[in-house]
Image (cartoon, coloured by chain):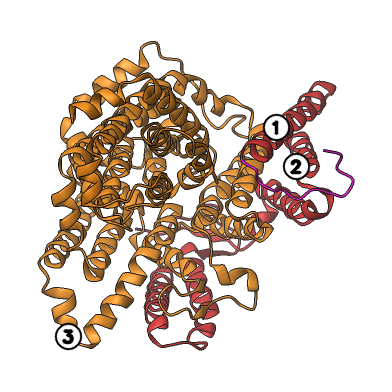
Amino acid sequence: MLDGLIAALGPGYLFFGLVGVVLGILVGALPGLTATMGTALLLPFTFNMPPGQGLAMLGGLYVAAMFADAVPACLVNTPGTPSALATSFDGNPLTRQGKGQVALVAASFSSMIGTIVGALVFLFLTPPLATAALEFGPPEFFWLGVFALTIIAGIAGDSILKGLAGGAMGMLIATIGLSATGGTSRYTFGFPELYGGVELVVALIGIFAMPQVFTMVRRRRQEATVGQYQRVPGAAVATVKEILRKPVNLIRSSLLGAGIGVLPGAGGPVAALVSYNEAMRWSKDRQKFGKGAVEGVVASETANNGGAGASMVPMLALGVPGSAPAAVILGALMLQGLRPGPELMERDSTLVHGFAFSILIAGIFTFVVGSLVAGQLARVVTIPVHLLAPIVFLLSVVGAFAIRSNLSDVYLMLGLGLIVYFLMNLGFHQGAIGLGVILGPIVEPALVQSISIARSSSYVEVFFTRPVSIGLIVLILLSVAWSVWSKQKERSRAST
Amino acid sequence: MPAREENPGRLRISEEIIAGCVCFAVAGLFGMRTGDGGRWLDWVYPQWLLGVIAAVGVILVVRGLLGYGNKRSLVPPVLRGGGTDVAAFAVLAIGYVLLVDVAGFWPMSALLVALASLYFAGERSRRTLIISVLTAVAVSLVGAVVFREIFYIPFPEPPWWPF
């Protein structure tokens, strides 16, 4: 392990790690460019590099992109990737209050902590966690998805009913196209373009960025800018101190992120949403959530970066990538002639440990670079609305097009944006719709596979008797009961 | 929650009823195509979702009839206040995405940013015009360099495009 640390501190590792971090911040900050796309674009450049340095660059890009997706989420309420959805719930309200710098520093610091915990899990717990992840079958994934859905009750505002309907509409959008399990064409309405389904990032841009543009335009006569910018000297130090005053949130979110990140297929979005929900449940200032709670940004960003490092666990130990960028990194390893699995962990332990340490160092680079640019980035909100709205619209179009180089994605994004803007005016919450779109592709295949298994045995046995499932069901019931109880408490407090 | 009359004297309807009707519309639209071929297992989950949406729709309508929810004017929002600006931007955006394939992505993008920023600027002066045009050209140039040259994204280009 010491050899790995020494290798990771070498100039080659550090330089290429930093290059990866800078590129990752660029990729993550632009909606439509994802960590997967960034790592895939960098892949050819790693062919002629020593394997360790190539991995350090790819790992740095992945980690930094997982932080930088918080930039558009906080500044213009548009998650750069699905993992930043929960970040936007509080990051954007903070920005509108003139605390954009605080939101971004909080995101970069918590990303660093999450990355460090994820990397430590990767270093020390790879063999046992990889084996435990295999115990997670379709019923467990189904219940995990349902557990993440219980966040709707917390974010839906006054109307849980509309939150529920919005979540179901989002999940319905995710069913458009060929079904993942049976290949049946669903809800294509005669448009061949819809056979490929609605791309997740395209949907998120439509659900979040477009209504934001329309809202800016509608309010332009009352508000010349989206928010204010207050330059606070020493904001970075003050924000870090504030975060460290609540260490439980950091520890819980890191562990949840790393724990869920290990599961192949669940990944950053589920980790961030579950972590946000738990932070809201246990916070003493839970009424601040959704209105600009730093704790909310911390929970989401710590978890999604914790998941990034942990997603390497099943990839290196079993050859099963825990996330899409991990799959690209798996490709990079194989192109170098390295075969992931227990053998790699023993034969090339210096390489594996060096990679884990370079992820940890990339987390620190991300915080340094992120907190340096946070103040400048936060000034975006002072751009006059008549200039900002068309620019955000243009970036959204670019992001939607960039995913598949297809104009029909742009039409879809615009159509979804108009529909969601209309729904928001009726009290539906865009976060609930986005949540449905993200969780639908996780919940449905798990449900269908579980039903298929249950048909040859018993539904009760498959869904309700497995130990992990029972644990998740208990958590779901507690989560719903807590939401109902806290809403009742808020109402009675408001009426007295 | 008691009903709140925002501006009495005009024809108004509960927001809950409109939201309920939207749920019915979504459930109806998707429900018509549910079960179109394929194996039944592929429709279990969408059917369940449609059931949830329709059930919520029923509850919302009942709540609206009982007097819950804010009252809204029946005059479409697009004809009121900032709604006209949203409608104007939506028309501009639709025109842009339809023409982008013919006229080229970046030239049309520059035109969109220039026109929209000019339209939404509070005062129209030579200074506003210069800022709008310069912003549009700068954003499009930087966008073209970053996305086309660095990330190799093949944006639509017109036949007359020289680069």
Quadrant of the image containing the N terminus of chain B: bottom left
The residue where tag 2 is placed is: B109
User: Where residue B145 appears, x then y in whole percent?
Assistant: 69, 33
The vertical placement of A471 against A358, above or below, is below
Image colour for chain B is red
In the picture, measured across the screen, residue A195 lies left or right of residue B160, that is left
Q: Give the class, few, some or many, for how many residues have Cα within 10 Å of label 2's Cα (few <14, many ≥20).
A: many
Q: Residue at x 37, y 77 (%)?
A: B45
Disc ID at residue A458? 3
Q: Inspect this view and state whether residue A285 appears.
A: no
The amino acid type found where label 1 is placed reads Val
Disc ID at residue B139? 1
The amino acid type found where label 2 is placed reads Ser
- Tell which chain the image draws in orange: A
Q: Residue at x 64, y 54 (%)?
A: A405
User: Where residue B154 appears, x then y in whole percent?
Assistant: 70, 48
